[in-house]
Amino acid sequence: MGVSVALAIAEAIAGAVGGIAIGRNLNGSSLGNAVNSIIGIVGGVTAGHLLRTTLPDLAQAVVIGSTGGILSSIIGALIGGGILITICALLKDNVPGVRDNRPRR
């Protein structure tokens, strides 16, 4: 298995972990663990890809298998998953039909 495939899988896992972790801390705005993990996967893979395309030195470090490059890409994916969950929760809270009919805790 190539480095890029293994890194994409690691980014997906890190994004899912970031999405679930942030989703649990959003009281009343969480979308559920399944949706949080799916959104986190999308955010993690997207953030990892954006980091590799915008930072050519990071991409080169990942290609040669540098531990620092791989870890920075995974940490970026973890943060990306959390950011996308936060954005989705903010959007969910600002949709009028969802906000008005939802019971408050």
Image (cartoon, helix red, strand yellow):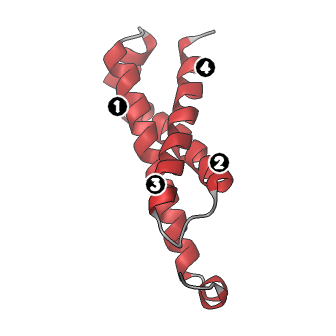
Specify the amino acid type for callout 4. Answer: Val
Q: CA distance from mark 3 to mark 4?
A: 26 Å
Q: CA distance from mark 3 to mark 1?
A: 26 Å
Q: CA distance from mark 2 to mark 4?
A: 18 Å
Specify the amino acid type for callout 3. Answer: Ile
Secondary element at tag 1: loop
Residue 11 to residue 59: above or below: below
- Residue position marked by numbered label 1 in the rendering: 55
* Nearer to me, 69 or 22: 22
Specify the amino acid type for callout 2. Answer: Ile
Nearer-N-terminus badge (4/1)? 4
- Residue position marked by numbered label 2 in the rendering: 38
- The residue at 50%/57% (across/down) is 24
Which label sits in the foreground, 4 or 1? Answer: 4
Nearer-N-terminus badge (3/2)? 3
Residue 28 to residue 94: above or below: above
Total labels drawn: 4
Give residue 5's mark.
4
- Direction from residue 69 to residue 46 in the image, left or right: right
Which label sits in the foreground, 3 or 4? Answer: 3
Residue 5 falls in image quadrant: top right
Give residue 22's mark.
3
Q: CA distance from mark 4 to mark 1?
A: 19 Å
- Direction from residue 30 to residue 78 in the image, left or right: left
Q: Quadrant of the N terminus?
A: top right
Which label sits in the foreground, 2 or 1? Answer: 2
Specify the amino acid type for callout 1. Answer: Leu
* Nearer to me, 31 or 54: 31
View extreme (bottom): residue: 100
Secondary element at tag 2: helix
Q: CA distance from mark 3 to mark 2?
A: 13 Å
